[in-house]
Amino acid sequence: MDQTALVQRIDRIESQLAIQQLVARYALALDARDLDTMVMLFTDDVNCGRLGKGRDVLRSFYDRIMRNFYRSQHQICGQVIDLDPQDADRATGKVYCRAEHEDRGKWVVMAICYFDSYERRAGHWHFVRRQEHDWYATDILERPGGPEFRQWPGRTDGKRSQLPHLFPTWQPFWERGDPAVPAELSSAP
């Protein structure tokens, strides 16, 4: 193996390890309500959609969100990282997470998949974007169900959980079989 290939290989390994740490630090900062650490995990020009751009906007967003539940615990269950073969400073990934939230006498659990974009700037990996999608949210004593698969007490936004339907392979898989089976297996296919 030549020197250039070895250096590139080591860089890929170090990048994957750094991105894994980024995800773990996010979960820890969220559960510790550490806004200073949280916002530094994102690029300085992070796009917060209609709210604007930058870490100050992101801090305000997370401050508001994290006041909606008392305790939380985000467990990282697995991660897939796809390094950009054309640009060693960019990557995407998907992160499985089980999150638990204490909210007004309830303990709400969520099954989440984050769809991430990462970028390395000045030698450090950051989130460019995190999109949270969930399979369900429900009190730990209940089963996920209903038309939206979101049973968070006091919160009804009318949105249906997008997973697993968001995966491009989901619908084609079921279309190749008996069309009656999904309704037999699920109350809300």
Image (tube, rainbow, N blue to C red):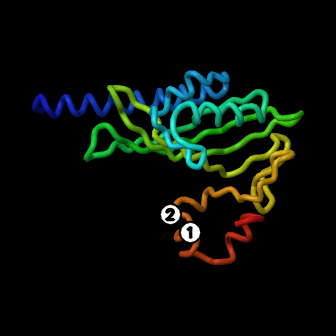
Give the percent coordinates (x, y) of residue 52.
55, 43
- Depicted 153 relative to depicted 73: above or below: below
The residue lying at 27 percent from left, 30 percent from top is: 11
The kind of secondary structure element at disc 2 is: loop
Single out the residue that lies furthest toward the right.
Answer: 105
Q: CA distance from mark 1 to mark 2?
A: 7 Å
**Residue identified by numbered label 2:** 168
- Give the tally of numbered discs: 2
- Depicted 66 relative to depicted 85: above or below: above
Residue situated in front as seen by the camera: 179 or 40:
40
The kind of secondary structure element at disc 1 is: helix
Q: Are marks 1 and 2 in contact (CB under 8 Å)?
A: yes
- Is 173 on the left-hand or right-hand side of 8? right
The residue lying at 47 percent from left, 36 percent from top is: 127
- Is 13 on the left-hand or right-hand side of 98? left
Amino acid on which the number 2 mark rests in the picture: Pro
The residue lying at 60 percent from left, 29 percent from top is: 27
**Residue identified by numbered label 1:** 171
Give the percent coordinates (x, y) of residue 189.
70, 66
- Is 103 on the left-hand or right-hand side of 72? right
- Is 112 on the left-hand or right-hand side of 143? left
